[in-house]
Image (cartoon, rainbow, N blue to C red):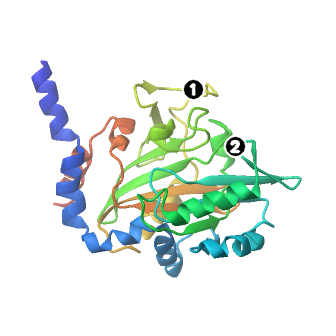
Amino acid sequence: MNVFQRITQIRERVVGMNERNINLIYPYNAKSDYKYADDKYMAKMLMEKHQVACPKTYTVVDQIGQIDIAWQAVREWKELVIKPAKGAGGKGIMILRQDNGVWLEAGAQVSEEQIFTHIANIIFGVYSFGDSDVALVEEYIHPHPFFHKLYPKGVPDIRIILLKSVPLLGMLRMPTAASNGKANLHQGGLGIGIEMDTGCLKEAYNGKVHIDHHPDSNRCIPGLIIPYWEELMALAVAASKCFPLNYMGVDLVIDKTKGPMVMEVNVRPGLGIQLANKQGLKQVIDKIMMKEK
């Protein structure tokens, strides 16, 4: 097979950004409905209304003058997460843990003044392209012990892309030392492909090449099976049905006590999931359409 044939073959299987927008996002989602996914607070309210499991929201801060009062109401928690409602790509997320009265982020001490400044920056729109925003303070997720086999730090999540509530592709987004405990691929996390029928993990993609082990723990990845796989798939479908969106990504987590939960949803899920799976979205959609005929 020459290089031109190879390029043609890739184009027949893989969805690029422009094609994703023109053939998937625009025809299947009304622009007026993007807000239901773009605003994490609005998304959570919808899911809670439909009794879809998601992390508990302790408080919402939308005014600078509310920061101190809101903080006094949540500082009793030993662990919590502060995030912008309209942020993207994991930006603006602060994961805090309290140790002997001292707040820590990624092991480094953080003052309450720094926390207040971070919340103010969220409200000012620093992490949401300049638009005014609100800060969500949520419960911290304790990952299921399964993930500790791969890497003990951070919170991994599972992204499922769905079309008309039919799961297409999935990947496990796994934190690394380079990503500072964040699961986002563009921050240094791993994208690990998943066999959709079984929840069995494939190789991992580190942004450059495919590898069969975690770069920090050196734990072999292919063959491991994600727990609660059937429940996760059912939860992703249930979450998708809460929204007036037909093409979307659903990000799930597994808490060691509460089990599967929806972390957030995305109307513009990234296309790296194809690299993680070595499989194109066109390929998957064509197979599903053939089954429906």
Residue 276 x/y as whole percent:
39, 37
Vertical order, 131 against 256 (above or below):
below
Q: Quadrant of the C terminus?
A: bottom left
Residue 83 x/y as whole percent:
57, 60
Characterize the local packing of mark 2: few (<14), some (14-19) or many (20 or more) Cα atoms within 10 angstroms: some
Vertical order, 78 against 238 (above or below):
above
User: Regarding mark 2 in the picture, which secondary structure is present there?
Assistant: loop
Which residue lies under the disc numbered 2?
A: 106
| Outermost residue to the right | 100
Q: Which mark is residue 215?
A: 1
Q: What residue is rendered at 57% in x and 26% in y?
A: 215
Q: Quadrant of the N terminus?
A: top left
Q: Quadrant of residue 21?
A: bottom left
Inspect this view and state whether residue 1 appears: no
Q: What residue is rendered at 31% in x and 73% in y?
A: 33
Residue 238 x/y as whole percent:
44, 70
